[in-house]
Image: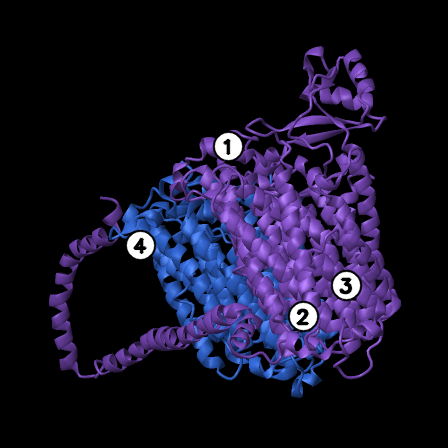
Chain colours: A purple, B blue
Amino acid sequence: MTTSTIPLLILVPFLGAMLNAFFGRRFGKSFVTCIGVSAPLIAFVMGAALFGDLRQRDGMTIVQLDADLQRQVAEQFGASARYELVTVHGAHGSSERQVLRVEEPYEGFVSYALANRLITEGELETEHGADAVIARAGDVDPAALTFELGNWFRVGGFEVNFAFLLDRISILLVLVITGIGSLIHIYSTGYMGDRPAGTFARFFTYLNLFVAAMLVLVLGKDLLLMFVGWEGVGMCSYLLIGFDYGDKGNAACGTKAFVVNRIGDLGFVLGMLCLVVLGRQAALSGVGGDVFSLDVEFLRTLVGHGAEHGAAAAHGAHGGGTSMIGVACLLLFIGATGKSAQIPLHIWLPDAMAGPTPVSALIHAATMVTAGIYMITRLSFLFEHAEVFGVPVLGIVAVIGGLTAFCAGAAAIAQDDIKRVLAYSTVSQLGYMFLGVGAAAYGAAVFHLVTHAFFKALLFLGAGSVIHACHSQSMSKMGGLREYMPWTHKTMMIGGFALAGFPLLSGFFSKDLILFHVLARSNMEGAHWLWPLLYGMGVFTAALTALYSMRLLRLTFYGSYRGSGHPHESPWVMTVPLQILALGAILASLLGWPKLFMWSGIEGYAELLPHSLHAVVAGSPVDRMLEEPKHWLEILGLGIGTLVAVGFCVLGFFVLWNLPPSEIAWERPVGWMRRLREFLFRAWMYDEVVNKQGAQPAVKQLSYSLWRWFDDKTLDQGLVDGMGRVGVELSHMTRAAQSGRVSSYLRWFAMGAVVLPLLAILASPLFSLLTAWFAGGGTH
Amino acid sequence: MVEGIPLLEITILIPLLGVLFLAWIPEDDPEATRSATLALSLITFLASLPLYFMYDVEAGGYQFARVYDWLGPIGAQFSLGVDGISVLLIVLTTFLVPIAVLASWKGIDKRVKSFHAALLLMEATMIGVFAARDLLLFFLFFEVQLVPMFLFIGVWGGEDRVRAAVKFFLYTAVGSLLMLAGIAYLYVKAGHTFDMTAISAAMPGALSTSEQFWVCLAFLIAFGIKVPVFPVHTWLPHAHVQAPTAGSVILAAVMLKMGGYGFVRFCLPWFPDGLVVEMGGMFSLATLMTWLGVGGVVYGALMAIAQTDLKKLIAYSSVSHLGLVVAALFAGFTAGPGFVEGGHARAITGSVYQMVGHGLSTGALFFLVGCIYDRRHTKKIAELSGLAKPAPKLATCFVIASLASVALPGTAGFVGEILMLLGMFENNVAAAAVGATGMVLGAVYMLWAVQRVIFGPTEGANKEVQDLEPVELWGLVPLLAAIFVLGLVPGPFLSRMEPAINQLAGLYGG
């Protein structure tokens, strides 16, 4: 696998989309299925191959070379293909340079290099007590591949390239997107199977296009390229939410999703602008030449720079550079709240459920909505240094995350629509991820992102299977499906318990790792009182999660069937993806088993995924603390997690289980319970108060009255037409002057003879007076 | 070899002689008229391509320049020449005229010959505006192109066409009058010449600060009406609503850009002191234009939200988009001591680029509204619904054009907008932040319109709507393709503009 595979990864689903767009309708459904499914599958295979490649590179050594040696190296090693020249931007003020990547073992290279005077003895450094080891450039990750397709645009010193970065985080996301994406594509061939060929082709066109855009988002090395994907997935989401556009409501939900996302994107754009200003200042002071960009490597250099040169007078309003990074990160985080449905921009996600269910599984659970977490993790080196008015931006991230997790979790309990339960659950779980990111536990957050992708995709696809069978999304019309749909039942039970954080399932480990980091933060010296509070909220939310998961399973699969018709199990193209995802929901836990559960010999496999990310993300203070064996905190965290999950699952099992279904559906609650239910059903009334009764009518009313009374009546009909009317009136008046009477003309002539010379005398001083007043103001 | 071929003259003459050629075609054969005009405009487009490809980026400056004697006694010459900015706008013009012919293929069936003659006359004068290197010649072209547009609206327009045409004409005439006064003043002060190169050399020294202020104000009003800048925009919605499709396409895509072009060509390089001097100690013309611009972004968008007529909605969206284009040109002057030369250049580059990008996306939108009107004979949003079902191709094109209008990355608008915001942000954070809200508001009015017109249930007469025909697709597909080409490969276009803009921004560098 060469690095040029990276753009191919994006091209394959894009080509799939184009083929289906132009030929899908003509060649029929089997053609569409073939193209639509094979595109993400091919991308997945390519991604897996690249993953293998990266794993191999993990053990490589980086050799730094100065410029004139590069040519020699290229000549000597040209044929062996065991090395690679890479350009990196140095950190902390050093300029761009070339480094050489050599495969392990490198002894052969060392002797060769010394013999051929490519490197002198002096350039060899001793590291970690080993013998001669070639200098490791600390800021270069050997397991990172970059590929530059070309320049997008360059204006002045500002440069944007089509550059891609494949490293430990992005490959992980690539595998999730294409892997889970492929399963969802396969499932969709069954779910959408009864649609006409044109609609079927359109669906797969959008779906493939989404995969391509998501890959651009994840692989983009330049923030602006990432933004291309960021908006691209938003567009696909918009098109897929309103997929069944014949219904007025669906189209409106799509518009709402796009507009709310755009509010976030405005933040993203302004954040990028702040970074560009910082970058230009850095470029002016000689870091990296006169070229500046939004390239991630370049942005890395800003961190050190911001502190030194930040006091640029021109941007005094923002204070120094450090807080300029702070403002930038806060604005970028607003972008993340839009895409990842966090308070205050979470309102679009529940409505996004108007899209077909596979779309909800792929876009609104597994991939797109996690883009915010990915972006912050990718830019963690900036967020670590981000402060606004002395408040760390990561703290704000954590608070928003914790708050969202709790509020959405509470709302999920009261829903009747099975997809809305899952939608609020997704918002809530994303909140956990932000809580993790905010606690600087990037590894834990990404781990939860992966496990959540498995079990939430599974739950959505299961829900789709149920909806397919019952022709209803209302849980009060379900029940007892266990007997009709054995596979859907079994797999969804696994998904539900994983979501509830039941011990040993994937959701348990990932959620508890996040909560553990928050707990550990509370236990650190000088910890803010918010951390214990956030931990408490997290645990309470875990209890809510267990409750609504059990409620969903209970209402759907147990009791007796309350709907109409005869539900049936879905075809194999739908159940097989469910089975694979269920397996994933169990096995994904292996990516992050805690040290506590490991015995000697395989300790190296503990927290596999979070640890592997340490090379690319900023270090967490908790990690540093954990280097000392402080297991009691881990035991406490896991203990609380187990107790809450098991306790509330059992509570759900033994208490809710025995109630008649209508009571659990909260169909006939009484008194304050009813009011609470109503309040939570409407998700804390937020959307109604802020959006439906607030922003929307306000903007419409403002627009309408401004247009009606100002633009039309005042400006156009009043001023403009008024001037016309004045002209007409004046002409009427002056027409009288042309009377044809000589005596009248003579009178005018006499008046002119007096007034005009007077005017000529007075005009010059008058004019200069006027000019001095108007234009001279600035000059004296 | 190329030196000998008068390329610019040829591109102006082909459509002009084409008008005479059309006279040979019998009045009762509209099909032949349309084909002949299409062929002529395509030849013009081909003739303009060498201008783009042979423009020497390394050398920069004005190329293909030629001077002929014209009005000798007063020093006016028939002087032509193009720099990177003009070339881009000329190619935009010649690219759009064939599309305008295709856009009116079905809609125009009365006085077909006169219609196409007017269109060709308009093309010649528009190219002339962008190619003129003599102020009086510029003014001549600038004024003459009003006539065919006046006829377009007044003869082939909608129900209220005469009022709209008169309003359009008078509005612009007021601006033109002021411009003529400004030109006359410059002529006297800059050494009795209309030669723009000579005036450039003489300016800004030839005028005192307060003289610069007044002359600049005259130019700003003239071009501000043309763009149009809030609050002198009220002619635009009327003109657009009444104009035939081809008229709207040309008006939005090219004619409005003459205002922006005028700012870039005259106001920025000639009156730097007049722009920054503060009126009555309060604020400068540059500040005024910047805030009218970004104010227009918000105002135009709010107006668009309120509209019930699809065409009017798109007309107001132009006010919003072009507000940012204007603000980006002037924001650099409002920076004060922290002025960033590179930022100013980036903003101007983005601004010119967006002129082209907006021309393409809004041109496509007006084209599509025309297609809808030809089928449904209404532009009322409330009467249109669910067009995606009977007309999927039309719907697809409309959605693509709408997304291009909201500057989705990958389209031309994104490159222009991000460069403008970037450049403005470096010099005027507040104006950039206000201007950026257009991102959100644009999505509101545009997608809301799509939601109501393209999506939703299909009822009544909307069920009978025919999908796009090949002749319409021949016009739309190149238009939409160009949007993506400019969005994905902006390099060659930007590099042609770079020398001109660096020179412009360099004037204030010291």
Q: Earlier in the sequence, mark 3 or mark 2?
A: 3
Q: Which chain is home to disc 4?
A: B
Q: For numbered disc 4, what is the local secondary structure?
A: helix
Q: Nearer the viewer, residue A278 or A503?
A: A503
Q: Would you say B191 lies left or right of A643 here? A: left
Depth check, mark 2 against mark 1: the one in front is 2
Mark sitting on residue B214: 4
**Could you say where residue A615 lies in the image, as x and y percent from the top left?**
67, 35
Q: Earlier in the sequence, mark 3 or mark 1?
A: 1
Circles 3 and 2: CB atoms closer than 8 Å: no
Circles 3 and 1: CB atoms closer than 8 Å: no
Mark sitting on residue A305: 1
Q: For numbered disc 3, what is the local secondary structure?
A: helix
Mark sitting on residue A656: 2
Distance, label 3 to label 4, CA atoms, is: 78 Å
Distance, label 4 to label 2, CA atoms, is: 81 Å
Mark sitting on residue A601: none
User: Could you tell me the amino acid type at mark 4?
Assistant: Trp
Q: Which chain is home to disc 3?
A: A
From the image, tell me which residue sits under label 3: A493
Quadrant for residue B11, please give it: bottom right
**Could you say where residue B232 lies in the image, as x and y percent from the top left?**
39, 67
User: Could you tell me the amino acid type at mark 2?
Assistant: Leu
